[in-house]
Image (spheres, rainbow, N blue to C red):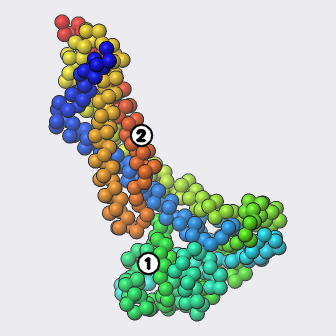
Amino acid sequence: MLPNLFKKTPLAWLQVTKEKTRLAVAVAGIAFADMLIFLQMGFEAALYDASIQPHRNLNADLVMIDPQLQTLFAVKSFSRERLYQGLSIDEVASVNPVRFSLGQWRNPDTRLERTILVWGVDPSQPAFKFDEVNRNLDQIKLLDQVMFDRAGRPEFGPIAETFAKTNKYETELNNISVNVTGLYTNGASFAADGNVIASESTFMHLFPNRKTDEVDIGLIKLKSGADREQVKSRLESMLPDDVKVLTVEDFAQVEKAYWESGTAIGFIFGIGVGVGFIVGIVIVYQILYSDVSDHLPEYATLKAMGYTDMYLLGVLVQESLLLALLGFFPGFLLSAGLYQLAATATMLPVGMTLNRAVNVFVLTVVMCSVSGAIAMRKLRSADPADVF
């Protein structure tokens, strides 16, 4: 009995591979559907990763913000006094005020302006985890000196190349002359194509309408051994409701939630994934439906021999799974290549991940299985009486 199990005719495989042209069309269709899903998921993840990257690079254990702050691109300030009130707790080692705002950077070659995110920090205290920034904070102590994000869009100008050769770069920010005195790497996002870091005095010079007694983010460093959650609870109970205290990761999730549910972008990418899934179902269904239609007499003969609808459904499901396997891998490889092209063109962190590949593979299997189940309706119409 056992050897007979290995002598079974691979009916599903023979059905799939008999018509080479049809197989090629099916594989191409599934690969195309997978590419749609991969690209939508990839750009959505890149949006979130790029938008929360500055948050995760903040040099803090806790952050203090205005409760209405949802994104770095809509400033909500609070009183500096609230931040320094946190020093009354013994476990708090230091506090550090940070400001941010969108400014207009002028490319000195093209004279065109482009929006850039400007950070105002205290040069005497590291506000970020960037080693390049922290080693050169003294370089921005002078007025109108800034550090530029080399991972920003090339439309800002050949800043990194010029600075590497001459160790200086001069341009205009908000119509004020500024000098680039250092470079670091952060990256662009969907809302801002680049970043610059300036001192508090330079920031106030660039944005004269901002109030000196207000800050946008308060960085809180704790003493060694302090319980972060306990200190967070004490700060929340001690301070009024006009500020909120969060962990750095929770602060990042506030930004992510804004892009995910507060804008149409997350919805659009979700629709894109759904469209790819539906396209794949339609393509595989058409292939399986055509296969069943072309071989309806043979399926009717199998029914006359005693094979049940469940057995034939199993054959269709096997065919759909084979198509899923054959279509997924070219779709995966093509998507990985397109990720590289997109990352180069957009300067966004678009890349393939194992988790995403597994998710898309599961979606592909479900997509093809659903198609096989739908095609079964045609197979049920195979009547042995029509053959004999």
Residue 135 appears left or right of 14? right
- Determine whether the residue tagged by mark 1 lies in a helix, strand or loop: loop
Quadrant of the image containing the N terminus: top left
Pointer 2 local density, CA inside 10 Å: few below 14, some 14–19, many at least 20: few
- Is residue 272 placed above or below 204 in the rendered structure? above
Residue found 37% across the figure and 31% down from its top: 369
Q: Position of residue 227 (x, y in %)?
A: 75, 62
| Residue placed most toward the observer, 73 or 371 | 371
Residue found 74% across the figure and 59% down from its top: 229
Q: What is the distance, in whole Å, between disc 2 and disc 1 at their CAs?
A: 38 Å
- Is residue 241 placed above or below 148 in the rendered structure? above
Residue 16 appears left or right of 349? left
- Label 1 near label 2: C-beta < 8 Å? no
Pointer 1 local density, CA inside 10 Å: few below 14, some 14–19, many at least 20: many
Residue 5 appears left or right of 237? left
State the residue position of label 1.
150
Q: Note whether residue 293 is visible.
A: yes
- Is residue 296 placed above or below 349 in the rendered structure? above
Q: Position of residue 331 (x, y in %)?
A: 31, 48
The disc, 2 or 1, on the residue closer to the chain's N-terminal end is: 1
Residue found 20% across the figure and 21% down from its top: 295
Q: Note whether residue 244 is visible.
A: no
Displayed quadrant of residue 228: bottom right
Give the label on residue 354, or none: none
Q: Position of residue 305 (x, y in %)?
A: 25, 9
State the residue position of label 2.
362
Quadrant of the image containing the C terminus: top left
Q: Amino acid at mark 1?
A: Arg
Q: Amino acid at mark 2?
A: Val
Count of numbered marks: 2
